[in-house]
Amino acid sequence: MGQPSQTPTRAAKQGRSPWPVASVAGAVLAALLAASTRLVPAVGGWLSHMLLMLTATLSMTKDLLLVGGLAVLVASLLTPLEALGWWAGWYGEDLRKAA
């Protein structure tokens, strides 16, 4: 794989940063969103519904990560017992009797 292209952007050629344009675009988008929630009440309801859904999704994700972490913890605590059982001869009795 070759090196990425080092061609400077137009803003970089002129010695300007592209961040002011992005900041203005973000401010305009935020203003439009705020105005739409005031002018069209259904948009505000839709946004609050989306926020509730996002909150529920994040809560479920947190719970799933917690349960997964506890499962890994229990499995890591039980692993030495399984190895000890093999070493002590607790397993494999049926194989010796069959032979």
Image (cartoon, rainbow, N blue to C red):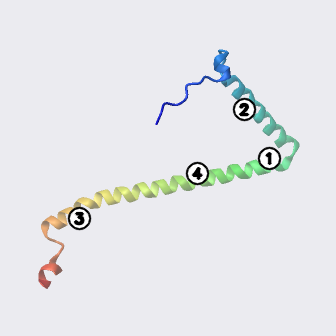
Q: Residue 26 carries which label?
A: 2
Report the residue at 49% width, 30% height from top: 3
- What residue did someone put label 4 on? 58
Q: Distance between the residues labelled 4 and 1?
A: 21 Å
Which kind of residue does numbered mark 4 sit on? Leu
User: Where does the image place residue 75, in percent across and percent down from the top left?
Assistant: 33, 60
Closer to the N terminus: mark 4 or mark 2?
A: 2
Which kind of residue does numbered mark 2 sit on? Gly
- What residue did someone put label 1 on? 44
Report the residue at 14% width, 84% height from top: 98
Spot the residue most to the front: 2
Mark 2 Cα within 10 Å, few/some/many (few <14, many 20+)? few
Q: In which quarter of the image is residue 80?
A: bottom left
Closer to the N terminus: mark 2 or mark 3?
A: 2
- What residue did someone put label 3 on? 82
Q: In which quarter of the image is residue 30?
A: top right
Q: How far apart are marks 4 and 2 (CA)?
A: 25 Å
Q: Is mark 1 on a helix, strand or loop?
A: helix
